[in-house]
Amino acid sequence: MVKKENSTNTKKTEILIKTALTLGLILALLIAFKAGMSFGAGAGEPGTQADPIVTLSYLESRLANMDNTGEGGYTSQTGSGKNGGMTKITLSKGDVLNLDQGTLLVIYSGSGIVAGSSGLVNISSGELFKDGMTAVLYSLYMGLAGDSAVLAKGEMTVYISGGYSLD
């Protein structure tokens, strides 16, 4: 009779140990998951408003600190962005900003449509924006050839580095 009780107690102890280990493992996984979520893991699709690659406040502060002087701009109708920096240009509805090959462009405000058979490369996302596609705010674009351009759908502010002309 004593052997049967010891055998039963041993089995109960083994079951309790296995149950405790399983519950402990589940609890540890839940804590790890919750910690990951609190640090922003899985917060949203990368590059969207929920999980931006570059925060809006950072971009606004960097662009606000840039000097608006130098060659080019709206008054000369043609020019190039400053060496090592960018030039701010404000476009009106219907203006076409033609980009030289290799020119970099950031659309800061407003809305524009990509024009030209070569299109623009969105360096931020790695996508080719073809003729007729709407350009995305705060993305870095590069003109592929002399026929790359952006058509302003309304008032639009851009920062540009490289050669351009304004029609």
Image (cartoon, helix red, strand yellow):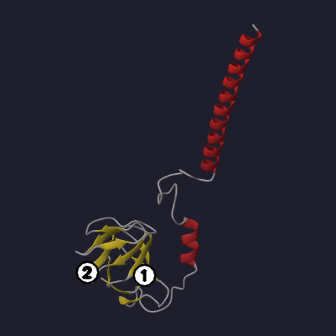
The quadrant where residue 67 appears: bottom right
Residue annotated with mark 2: 147
Residue annotated with mark 1: 160
Q: Is residue 24 visible?
A: yes
- Name above or below for residue 57 compared with residue 18: below
Residue 3 lies, in percent from the top left, at 74, 12
Q: Secondary structure at mark 1?
A: strand
> Label 1 amino acid?
Ile
Residue 22 lies, in percent from the top left, at 63, 32
Instruction: Please give the name of the residue rendered at 25% of the width and 75% of the height, measured from the top-left corner.
Output: 118
Instruction: Please give the name of the residue rendered at 37% of the width and 75% of the height, measured from the top-left corner.
Output: 92
Give the CA separation, mark 1 to mark 2: 16 Å
Give the quarter of the figure containing the C terminus.
Answer: bottom left
- Crowding at dot 1, Cα within 10 Å, few <14 / some 14-19 / many 20+, comes out as many
Residue 165 lies, in percent from the top left, at 33, 86
In the image: residue 155, left or right of residue 22: left
